[in-house]
Structures are given as C-alpha cells and as structure tokens.
Image: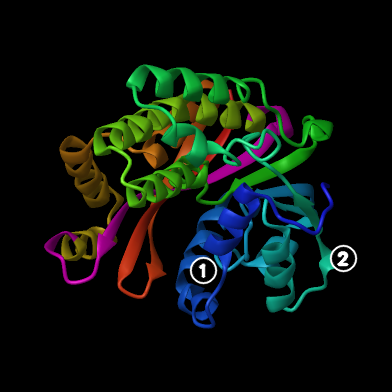
C-alpha cells in the first residue's frame, strides 16, 4: 500500500466523487438489497464460507452491504484508490477497519505515472491535432502493460467489480479539458483531445479486464456492475425505464433502443470486453438512485472463467 500524506490528482479526483452525503447510504438501501439478491443465487450454492473476496472500486461502500458479504466470505479485501473513503465507509456500516483488508489501489497506472500532473499546461501549449495525438499516445502507451495487485495471482474465490468502467480516467480527462475551455483553448482541439482519450479507453479497459482474469481463481465467481445509462426524473424515458424494470425482456428492449440511438458507451464496452476471457452466466437490470433526481441504470452480471 502506498503511504503518504499528500494525495495525488487521480486519488483526489476519486475522493471528491466518493464523498457521501448524509442521505446517500439510506437512499441506496433498496439498491443494495437488489445487489444482495442477485449475488445470493450463486453464493448460496457454496458449502460454507468462501475464503477470499475482492471488491474493486469500493469507495465509501455506500453501494455495497458489508454485513451481507461477511456472511459469505472469511476474508474480504476492499480496493480503491481512495483509502480515506474506504475507512469512513467501513466505520459507517458498524465495522472496524481491521475487519477488512483495505488496499489503496491504482487500477490504471495513471496515478503512478503522474499522467495528469502537467496535462493541462502541456495540452495548452499545443496548437495542432498532430501534437495532441503524439502527446496522448505516448502518455497512454505507458499504461499498456500495467498490472494491479500483482502479488495476488489467482488468489480470490470471488471478485465484485462495482461501477468503475466509467470512472477509469476518462471523466478526469473531461475535467481537465473543462479547465482548458475556461482558459479559452480552441474548442476544436478540446473536442479532439476528448475524442482521442475516449478511443484510448479501449486498451485501458481491456487491460483492466485481463487483470480480473489474473486475480480470480480458475473456478471463481466474477460479479460485475456497470452503469450503462442514466435517466433523469420526469423525462418520458425515465417513465419507460421504471415501467419496464420488472421484466428483463422489456429492459433489454429499452437498452437496444438506447444503444441504437446513442451507440456503445464505456460501461457497455467494459462488459462486452469481458467475453474474451469469461462466460456470462446471468445478469439483471437495477435502478441505482444515484442523485436526488437522477437514476443510473446498472447491469449486474455473473461470469465465470472460460
């Protein structure tokens, strides 16, 4: 675990995202129950407690039920780049820090490479797409072989991946380019920077998924939650989603229509790319009341090694 009093940029960005308001844990109660219900089916087939569970993207733990997980696993490792939020989340659910192994983990390699330290100043100095492409290509290439938790090869009976694909760097790129916009940097170069970074997310996600295969035991359980799209209250689309949520068939139809209109997103690709190394066993759609008037539509999938 990396020690240090001063958080780096990637860590600080995620810490800001993870900050819990006083109502969030209560507001997400039904969401956690639905996650528990999905996990229960394969886990109840196991005899006794499983040895080791890894939860990736634990954050403040508002979206996971630690007591439920404790009822199925002897040892639970919570991993996130934001160690402070994990500590707070564990205490908030009535546990001690020592009840879990808390591991501060950079899932992409961007933290260790100081990717964002000078990005705004560097890009601001460029005045052509060619310069931006060369710069970002060089930056992203440093993460191509990145591996996290390498000391835990095939260690875990189960891995739970909380909604993390959409948080793997791209949002922070958008945050950086919003600063560039405030600095009157040309909009066409901002758009090019964002588009180039989005394309670079493909190998980042592929590498992340390969790490899952590396960490999971050959006959282990992999549970992946991915936020696929969002739906604001009072919109016609929101009514369509909520009225279809009782039926997986209806929700699949909603999703295909959304996909046809908007195309693949990062959350979609994260799940799709898992098919390289894993078999999809089951899945379910869940409404995640992410903000007071905004829902995230999450797909939770159960997979096993091929």
Relative horizontal placement of residue 142, taking residue 96 as reference (left or right): left
Rendered residue at 62%/65% (across/down): 61
Q: Is residue 229 magenta?
A: yes
Rendered residue at 39%/44% (across/down): 177
Q: Which numbered disc, 2 or 1, marks the residue that appears first in the sequence?
A: 1
- Where residue 10 appears, as percent x and y from the top left, is 61, 48
Which stretch appears magenta?
213-237
Q: Are marks 2 and 1 in contact (CB under 8 Å)?
A: no
Q: Quadrant location of residue 146? A: top right
User: Where is mark 1, residue-wise?
Assistant: 33
Q: Quadrant location of residue 194? A: top left
Q: Which mark is residue 98?
A: 2
Relative horizontal placement of residue 77, taking residue 136 as reference (left or right): right
Q: Nearer the viewer, residue 1 or 299?
A: 1
Coloring scheme used: rainbow
Nearest-to-viewer mark from 2 and 1:
2
Up/down of 235 relative to 219, above or below: below
Rendered residue at 39%/32% (across/down): 198
Task: Measure the C-alpha gap from mark 2 to mark 1.
Answer: 25 Å
Residue 301 visible, this angle? yes
Q: Nearer the viewer, residue 278 or 93?
A: 93
Relative horizontal placement of residue 30, taking residue 209 as reference (left or right): left
Question: How many C-alpha atoms fall within 10 Å of the one at disc 1: few (<14), some, or many (≥20)?
Answer: some
Relative horizontal placement of residue 287, taking residue 98 as reference (left or right): left
Q: Is residue 61 magenta?
A: no
């Amino acid at each position: 675990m990396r020690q240090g009093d001063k958080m780096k940029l990637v860590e600080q960005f995620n810490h800001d995202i993870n900050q819990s308001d006083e109502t969030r844990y209560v507001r997400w109660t039904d969401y956690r129950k639905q996650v528990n219900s999905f996990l229960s089916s394969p886990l109840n087939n196991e005899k006794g407690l499983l040895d080791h569970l890894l939860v990736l993207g634990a954050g403040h733990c508002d979206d996971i039920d630690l007591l439920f997980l404790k009822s199925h696993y002897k040892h639970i490792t919570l991993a996130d780049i934001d160690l402070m939020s994990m500590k707070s989340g564990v205490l908030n659910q009535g546990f001690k820090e020592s009840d879990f192994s808390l591991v501060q983990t950079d899932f992409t390699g961007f933290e260790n490479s100081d990717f964002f330290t000078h990005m705004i100043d560097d890009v601001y100095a460029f005045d052509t797409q060619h310069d931006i492409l060369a710069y970002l290509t060089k930056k992203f290439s440093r993460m191509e072989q990145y591996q996290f938790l390498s000391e835990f090869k095939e260690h875990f009976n189960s891995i739970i991946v909380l909604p993390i694909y959409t948080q793997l760097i791209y949002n922070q790129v958008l945050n950086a380019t919003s600063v560039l916009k405030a600095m009157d940097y040309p909009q066409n170069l901002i758009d090019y920077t964002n588009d180039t970074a989005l394309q670079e997310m493909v190998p980042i996600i592929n590498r992340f998924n390969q790490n899952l295969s590396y960490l999971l035991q050959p006959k282990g359980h992999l549970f992946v939650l991915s936020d696929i799209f969002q739906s604001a209250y009072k919109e016609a689309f929101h009514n369509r989603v909520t009225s279809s949520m009782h039926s997986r068939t209806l929700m699949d139809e909603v999703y295909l229509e959304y996909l046809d209109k908007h195309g693949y997103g990062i959350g979609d690709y994260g799940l799709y790319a898992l098919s390289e190394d894993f078999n999809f066993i089951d899945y379910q759609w869940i409404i995640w009341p992410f903000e007071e008037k905004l829902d995230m539509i999450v797909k939770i999938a159960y997979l096993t090694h091929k």
